[in-house]
């Protein structure tokens, strides 16, 4: 892995948290994505929300550079245990700062946050909850 990636990015790439997928047919699971594989980066995030509207599980698949994989991994860590209403209170810049992403890699954090926000919105729509 190139030297210009921070230790946090390298750690999340070598040991990604919550990589994989949740069963899409589960009524408590919803997913969202951001980016486009044809353009080089795509993040898909799924969340499982409990009856108390707290995120109980999260999973991701990311295609792209190490920064994109690390940002998706970190986003799933951040959302676990959060009430749905607070699940995306952090900004993409918070992910970028936590991973020490350079400005030219900041889009990776935006994709991860965007995919997470889309998953939260998909769950809200699925359950008929107000945004």
Image (cartoon, helix red, strand yellow):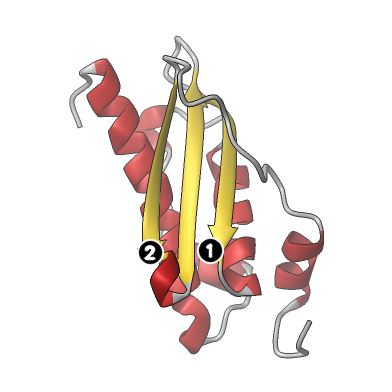
Q: Is 14 placed above or below 5 here?
A: above
Tell me the quadrant of the picture where the N terminus can be found.
Answer: bottom right
Q: Distance between the residues labelled 1 and 2?
A: 17 Å
Q: Quadrant of residue 8?
A: bottom right
Residue positioned most to the front: 38
Residue 6: percent from left, percent from top: 72, 79
Residues at circles 1 and 2 in contact by the CB criterion of under 8 Å? no
Quadrant for the C terminus, please: top left
Q: Where is residue 68 in the image (x, y as percent from the top left)?
A: 56, 67
Residue extending furthest toward the top: 51
**Residue 59 seen:** yes
Q: Residue at x 39, y 50 (%)?
A: 33
- The residue indicated by pointer 2 is 35
Q: Element at badge 1?
A: helix
Residue depicted at 63% across the width and 53% down the height = 73
Residue 112, given in percent of the width and then of the height, sits at 47, 58
Q: Which numbered mark, 1 or 2, is in the foreground of this view?
A: 2
Asked which secondary structure carries label 2, the reply is strand
Q: Quadrant of residue 35?
A: bottom left
Query: On the rendered structure, is 59 left or right of 50?
Result: right
* Percent coordinates x, y for residue 79 in the rendering: 53, 40
Q: Is residue 86 left or right of residue 4?
A: left
Query: Is 127 above or below relative to 14?
Result: above
The residue where tag 1 is placed is: 95
- Looking at marks 1 and 2 on the same chain, the residue that comes earlier in the sequence is marked by 2
Name the residue located 64 percent from the left edge and 63 percent from the top edge.
70
Question: What residue is at 67 percent from the left and 46 percent from the top?
Answer: 19
């Amino acid at each position: 892995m190139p030297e210009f990636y921070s230790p946090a990015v390298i750690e999340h790439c070598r040991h990604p948290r919550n990589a994989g997928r949740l069963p899409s047919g589960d009524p408590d699971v919803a997913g969202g994505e951001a980016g486009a594989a044809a353009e080089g980066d795509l993040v898909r995030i799924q969340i499982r929300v409990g009856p108390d509207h707290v995120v109980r599980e999260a999973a991701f698949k990311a295609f792209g550079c190490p920064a994109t994989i690390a940002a998706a991994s970190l986003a799933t860590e951040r959302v676990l245990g959060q009430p749905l209403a607070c699940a995306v209170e952090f900004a993409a810049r918070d992910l970028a700062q936590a991973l020490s992403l350079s400005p030219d890699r900041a889009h990776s954090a935006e994709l991860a946050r965007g995919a997470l926000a889309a998953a939260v919105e998909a769950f809200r729509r699925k359950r008929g909850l107000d945004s």
